[in-house]
Image (spheres, grey):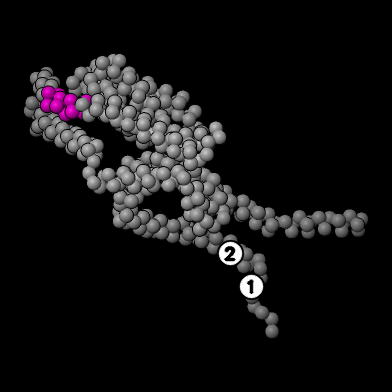
Amino acid sequence: MASSSPPPLELESSTHALKPFTQWLRVGLLFPLGFLNGWLLLLLVDNIQPLFNILLTSTLLAFLLDFPIRFLERRGLQRGWAVGVVLVLAVIVLTAIGIILIPILIKQLSDLISQLPSWASELESKVRELEQQWGPLQRSEFDLSRQQEAIIAQLQEALRSASGTFLSILSGTFQNTLNLFFTLVLTVFLLLGGETAWDGILKWLPPWWRTQISMHTPVKLRTFIGGQVAIAVGFGAVLALAFTVLNIPLGLLFGFIIGLGSLIPFLGAVTQISVSLFLMIQNFWAGIKVFAVAFVIGQVVDQVVSPRIMGSIVGLNPVWVLISVFIGFRLAGVLGALLAVPVASIVKTIADEVLKSRGQLEHSQAEQHLSPEPEIESDHAAAQTLTE
């Protein structure tokens, strides 16, 4: 009895017709699975705090300290000795910075908080002058002076709270000291045996994923983090020096704030505009000077310095950079925002490799499917030639 199975051509056509549906089904399943995994990741991060931030901080410090360690290794020094030398030098540099710069920053921050009431009164007087010049403002239901007082009060309270938090961190509590101790110990372990631990994690992954992650992750993280920190430190130092030369009030503090903000993409521009507008309240031309100097130096950094240091290591659309920064900040605060861009770049690079390999696989399958036809045509042509 003959079987009633459909011919291969019909099976192939039906499979080809179902292929778009299976692709859409796969894409449709990715969103809920990704959402579920992201929600579980948030729960995990919240439950293991502050361990997650300690791990991120230690990883960041290990990547930064790895640059001078590799430099000493290339000069013939063993890894252990190089780690010891770099750690001692790092402690000396940080101690010198703490002794020289930190007291100045604290004093300028205290001066800023103490000057806020006088700046608020100056702003109020300027608003009253505007109200006298523009009569409709007096009849407006919007009480500008009251709103201004509320904004200044909130700003003063925020600065006072930030100052108190900063001073409490410097003085140190038991919890902060313990977290700092664990961070330093974990950093040393990562410097000494980080590659072994990294290889142990990668062994759990399939070979293809292991190759891609090990090839892209260290390079992108090391290049982005090192380059971003170097640019931010240099940018802040140049701005602080320029503001001091131009006699900008609290120039060292404002240069430090703008340089610190430039660590995170888009935040540098926000801090530049905020500091400039804040200074315009007291001295209009001082605010203009700050904005002009920060804008010119920032353009030099973006157009000349940054491409030479980091090149095209990111390769992300600005929209995705902004989204990744928001997600990173939601997960781990400032550290997450700093690490969000290189992590997103790694994900994009691996996703491109997945699509590329899939496209090559489909192309090879299509070539295998079409390869018998030329052979049949060539056999038919050869038979016709022999007949002739």
Against 81, is 347 above or below? below
Residue 11: image x %, image y %? 62, 67
Q: Which residue is mark 1?
A: 6
Instruction: Using residue 215 as the reference point, say whether residue 175 is left or right of it.
Output: left
Q: Given the image, on which type of amino acid does mark 2 rest? A: Thr
Reply yes or no: does residue 49 show up in magenta. Answer: no
Q: Residue furthest bottom?
A: 1
Q: Residues within 10 Å of mark 2 (few under 14, many from 20)?
A: few
The answer for how far apart the CA atoms under marks 1 and 2 are is 13 Å
Residue at the spot 20% in from the left edge and 18% down from the top edge: 283
Figure quadrant of residue 5: bottom right
Residue 293: image x %, image y %? 33, 20
Instruction: Using residue 212 as the reference point, say whether residue 139 is left or right of it.
Output: left
Identify the magenta region.
108-120
Residue 92: image x %, image y %? 36, 31
Q: Which residue is mark 2?
A: 15
Residue at the spot 32% in from the left edge and 29% down from the top edge: 97
Residue at the spot 57% in from the left edge and 55% down from the top edge: 207
Residue at the spot 44% in from the left edge and 46% down from the top edge: 190
Q: Earlier in the sequence, mark 1 or mark 2?
A: 1
